[in-house]
Image: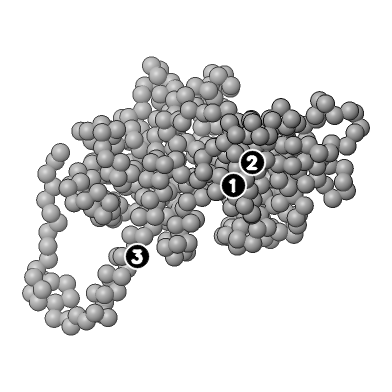
Amino acid sequence: MGNYRQPRRYGTAGSASAPGAGRTRTPGGADAARRDTARHSGQPRRAAYDVLAAVEDREAYANLLLPKLLAERSIAGRDAAFATELTYGTLRGQGTYDAVLAACSDRPLGQLDPPVRHVLRLGTHQLLATRVGAHAAVATSVDLVKSVAGPRASGYVNAVLRRVATRDMDAWLEIVAPDPMADADGNLAARYSHPRWIVAAYRDALGDTDDELETVLDAGNVRPRVTLATFPGGPPPAEVMPEDAVPGRWSPYAFTLMSGDPYPLIESGLAAVQDEASQLAAIALARAPVATTPPGAAQADELWLDMCAGPGGKSRLLQGLAAGTPDGLGPRARLVAAELHPHRAVLVGRIRGRRRRWYPPAVAGRRLRPRACRRAVLRPWRAPPPSRGPLAQVRV
């Protein structure tokens, strides 16, 4: 690690070279205002740090935790927007940022204490992908790591981020991305912050057309707009969505906000954040024909089982679809939302608006006889990817 001198101090208080020399300092004066501003300016970064730590340490949902933290800490307006950019931007770019940090650090990232790793990623995002000044990005990162990991890590974070600040993103990619002729997938993984296995899966699906493949990878890093879903049986989207919102392209319950805060709609219970892909999974299930139902017969008294319900977005939509259509022609069913993990089951209960029983799979198998369920949301277990960075949004 390089040695970095402490910033030169101005003269002592009262000397001619000291800024503000000769001024009377009172607790309610400019100094107190500056301290208050500095204290509040750290809130967005600390909120983003807490979300990043929760995502890695306990697999929290960033899109659920961040709004909660912003509300609890009274972070609003530009500070809330900044915290949102720091959180989601760092997660999107994590794969690329880790490659840059590996080139700037003499220690493997996996051997760093998690708090130090989170702060380095936040600082790198500010340096390479935002308009935050280099000095501010480094200084605030040093302050943050002192508060979450102690003063001993501050020099290391300062040195690494100063090295990151010596080049822009394009210059770093020329260094850290593998040669595309020798390792095409590795090059794209580094440039577009996607895990290698996702790049390989896209290549298998799209063929070796690099232009189309890069277009898809680039789309995964676009800042997503907020898409919401109304509740089947409730007011339609046209009556719920704001004037500048756009109806969904595929789901009849979807609309997308072009601007503004979705919190009032969510708090009112009229809509919930859910992308159209997630909505279509529930809609397709509800519309699938049941083989044991005679042609033309009403699909009544069905039992639907969501075997992996947390955090509850699809269960919420399925609950409304299971109630049937107002004309009585749609399917009517009872939905059982099964969730193994208690903390995720709590989210299901909150999203669906009232307490629901939850069953671990083994209990559900004995009590509910899954063979009797005519429809089931079957979500196979997925190994956690090595990086959540490329996900443009967390699927609900």
Q: Which mark is residue 337?
A: 2
Q: Residue at x 17, y 48 (%)?
A: 152
Q: Position of residue 46 (x, y in %)?
A: 35, 55
Side of 320 where 63 appears, left or right? left
**Residue type, mark 1 in image:** Val
Q: Secondary structure at mark 1?
A: helix
Query: First in sequence: mark 1 or mark 2?
Result: 2
Side of 204 where 95 appears, left or right? left
Q: From mark 2 to mark 3, how far is it between C-alphas?
A: 41 Å
**Residue type, mark 3 in image:** His
Badge 3: few (under 14), some or many (20 or more) residues near its Cα, within 10 Å?
few
Badge 1: few (under 14), some or many (20 or more) residues near its Cα, within 10 Å?
many
Q: From mark 1 to mark 2, how far is it between C-alphas?
A: 8 Å
Is residue 259 at least partly visible in the picture? yes
Direction right: furthest residue: 296
Q: Nearer the viewer, residue 127 or 241?
A: 241
Residue carrying label 1: 348
Q: Quadrant location of residue 206?
A: top right
**Residue type, mark 2 in image:** Ala
Foreground disc of the pair 1, 3 = 1
Side of 115 where 207 appears, left or right? right
Q: Which mark is residue 40?
A: 3
Q: Nearer the viewer, residue 260 or 153?
A: 153
Q: Position of residue 326 (x, y in %)?
A: 84, 50
Q: Position of residue 341 (x, y in %)?
A: 51, 40
Give the total number of marks visible in the rendering: 3
